[in-house]
Amino acid sequence: MSGERPVANRWLVVFGAVLMQLSLGAIYAWSVFTPSLIAAGWSRVETQVVFGVGLAAFALVMVVAGRLLVRFGPRKLAMAGGAVLGLGYVVAGLGGATNFWVVLIGVGVIGGAGIGLGYVVPIAVGMRWFPDKKGMITGLAVAGFGFGAMGWVKLAGSWGQLIENVGLAQTFVIYGFAYAALIWIGAIWMRMPPKGWAPKGFTQVATTASGGENYTLVEMLRTPQFYLVFLIFAVGAGAGLMSIGLMKLYPIEALEASGYSTIEASAIAGTAMAVFFSLANGLGRILWGMVSDKLGRKMSILVMTGTQAVFLFAFTAMAGTPWMLYLGATLIGFNYGGAFALFPAITADLFGNDRVGQNYPYVFLSYGVGGIVFPILGGMLGDLGNFPLAFSITGAACLVGAGAAVLIRTPDHEEAKHHFSGHGFMHQMHWDTLEEVVDHALHPDHYKRMDK
């Protein structure tokens, strides 16, 4: 142990996690900037490219963060994430807020990397402090990621009017400093529990279904369950991310077609995204997490993904009527948010509670895949004047995801230990070398560093 005092109350970890996630959810506030960028000459596709690159950088860097978590500990990693995220927005603001390449590098690459560095911290720390309530605690830990968008969107828009009063560039800079500050405060409580600690009355059962049996990275990659979970998360996250990217652009178009003025349509669409989608996104994380502790992770994922398909198919008929738009934004946001509670929890259930900080980033790569494919698809079809087709395609993808959820079974650890994909000694040697490297980096002896 490092000699630092452990967290006095495990619920302080939740408080710190929410503070961090309020800023890490910065990417969800992207839609408030897109009208100004389009007015400055950007295409819809360009706005979605920045969004997609940010999501991809988030997912890719999170893989590295899983290893850095072991080496440097959660608090230092969280502070690094806050610094990088803040730097990205400051770069975008000072370097030319309407220059595509500057914003792409600042908000997309650097900002996305900062989110990736910090995101795994509250999930891994929270599960170690709350092995008895994995779904609920994961939902609470990531709730701020969903709720945060509402505040940042409204601060820049109709409530704070930052963009109107100080301009887009200065808004980026202000947000950069605010993001870093909140994450650094939340990092104070990001410490792992002492070795062998467990909540009163809780006994860990060493079965895969409870997360007691821990899989190495290579063992996890040998199971079909990993690829099923990856597919479901990719389509579910991609559908929600496309909806976020288009939640202002498409309803404005649909509302104008229904007779609303541009100003009225913009206000209604902004409320749908900043209030209804964002609140539901945050609540979905908490409530789906709690439901999954009772209903089971697999059934919860099946219901969530299947109903999301229905809502996406129906959304094009809802977007032109304010109250129906609000309802559609709420339902899609609620299910989308739930994914961020359910997928870390099912990763822990299937592949081990103690390994979630290292294994979940590889599951989360699916978020990057979905974040590239579906938002850019939505932007391309939007430029062609066919937003409804984009929502129909994503609805069909969610139906496929629901079908995949039916196939999830508890993996066989012994089979994962001894099964080798492909043929031949050289192929097996490559797997063994990779496993040796990963196990060396993530050996339990290194966990003593994780309370820093």
Image (cartoon, grey):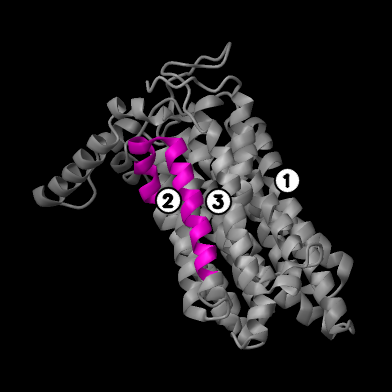
Residue shown at 58% from the left, 40% from the top: 185
Q: Magenta-highlighted stretch: main secondary structure?
A: helix
> What amino acid type should be assigned to the residue bearing mark 2?
Met
Residue shown at 83% from the left, 77% from the top: 265
User: In the rendered view of the protein, which quadrant contains the N terminus?
Assistant: top left
Residue 283, given in percent of the width and then of the height, sits at 73, 45
| Marks 1 and 3 in Cβ contact (< 8 Å) | no
Residue 304 placement, left or right of 431: right
Q: Residues within 10 Å of mark 1 (few under 14, many from 20)?
A: many
Disc marking residue 283:
1
Residue 134, given in percent of the width and then of the height, sits at 57, 31
Disc marking residue 180:
3
Closer to the camera: disc 1 or disc 3?
A: 3
Can residue 11 be seen at all in this image of the molecule? yes
> What amino acid type should be assigned to the residue bearing mark 3?
Ala
Residue 283 placement, left or right of 415: right
Closer to the camera: disc 3 or disc 2?
A: 3
Magenta stretch bounds: 63-92
Residue tagged by mark 2? 62
Q: Is residue 10 above or below residue 153?
A: above
Report if residue 339 lies within the magenta region: no
> What amino acid type should be assigned to the residue bearing mark 1?
Leu
Q: Residues within 10 Å of mark 3 (few under 14, many from 20)?
A: many
Report if residue 71 lies within the magenta region: yes
Residue shown at 53% from the left, 25% from the top: 129
SS for tag 1? helix
SS for tag 2? helix
Disc marking residue 81:
none
Number of labelled discs? 3
Q: Is residue 436 above or below residue 40?
A: above
Residue 402 placement, left or right of 39: left
